[in-house]
Amino acid sequence: AQSVTQPDIHITVSEGASLELRCNYSYGATPYLFWYVQSPGQGLQLLLKYFSGDTLVQGIKGFEAEFKRSQSSFNLRKPSVHWSDAAEYFCAVGAGDSNTGKLIFGQGTTLQVKP
Amino acid sequence: DARVTQTPRDKVTEMGQEVTMRCQPILGHNTVFWYRQTMMQGLELLAYFRNRAPLDDSGMPKDRFSAEMPDATLATLKIQPSEPRDSAVYFCASGLGGGSDTQYFGPGTRLTVL
């Protein structure tokens, strides 16, 4: 069965520092992979997604993620974090018969940004 | 700017009462998902629809939860009777349903059952 693991429940970084959020997935074939962000009191918003082609994916708000098949990982990165990036981040994998669009989400990583 | 809308945004009710949550998907989207978010369980998929037909509702407690799409512009999630353990934020999302498709989330309904 497909699954997603986000090993870090909570991360704190200083404003201006670089960021990497980890995501590991379990899936038999080439997965569809997503990163969503949730600001307090809001719904989830797509940051970026991977489904084929270049393994380095660019997203909104200066985020990028790299698909590494050998490590079953899809880590999210940002070179310089802004205070407005404080939020919860979810990694997700397309599940089962992927044409449904069904997703399996990780437990989320809460990002705190220190001034 | 097309958005998924959900009503109500907040609902406080007493145990045993019926609760109905509504979702208006983005016009033209043919797939609708219902999720529940809690601190303990994270994001759980309750049910989803394609072209108004239920594809999978295995995530829903069948005895008290029901989900429908009376028409293409409205999805509903009902809980009857509600219980304190149903307290959570319920999200609706819509999309075009392909494997790589983006799901667009509504702002959620925060349900508190006393």
Image (tube, helix red, strand yellow):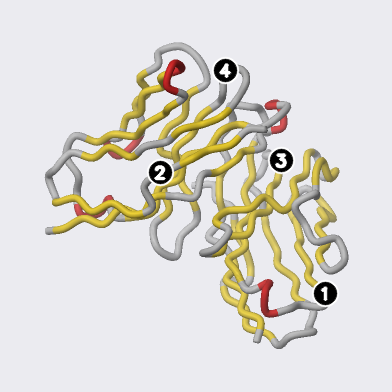
Mark 3 vs 1, N-terminal side? 3
Rendered view: A72 above or below A40:
above
The residue under label 3 is which amino acid type?
Thr
Q: Distance between the residues labelled 3 and 2?
A: 31 Å
Q: Distance between the residues labelled 2 and 1?
A: 36 Å
Q: Name the residue under label 1.
A: B80
Q: What element carries label 1?
A: loop
Q: What element carries label 2?
A: loop
In the rendered image, which quarter is residue B81 located in? bottom right
The residue under label 4 is which amino acid type?
Thr
The disc at residue A7 is 2
Q: Distance between the residues labelled 3 and 1?
A: 25 Å
Decide if residue A57 is on the left or right side of residue B8: left
The residue under label 1 is which amino acid type?
Gln
Outermost residue to the top: A53
Q: Name the residue under label 4.
A: A30
Rendered view: A18 above or below B5:
above
Q: Nearer the viewer, residue A70 or A91?
A: A70
Q: Name the residue under label 3.
A: B31
Do the residues at pointers 3 and 1 share their chain?
A: yes
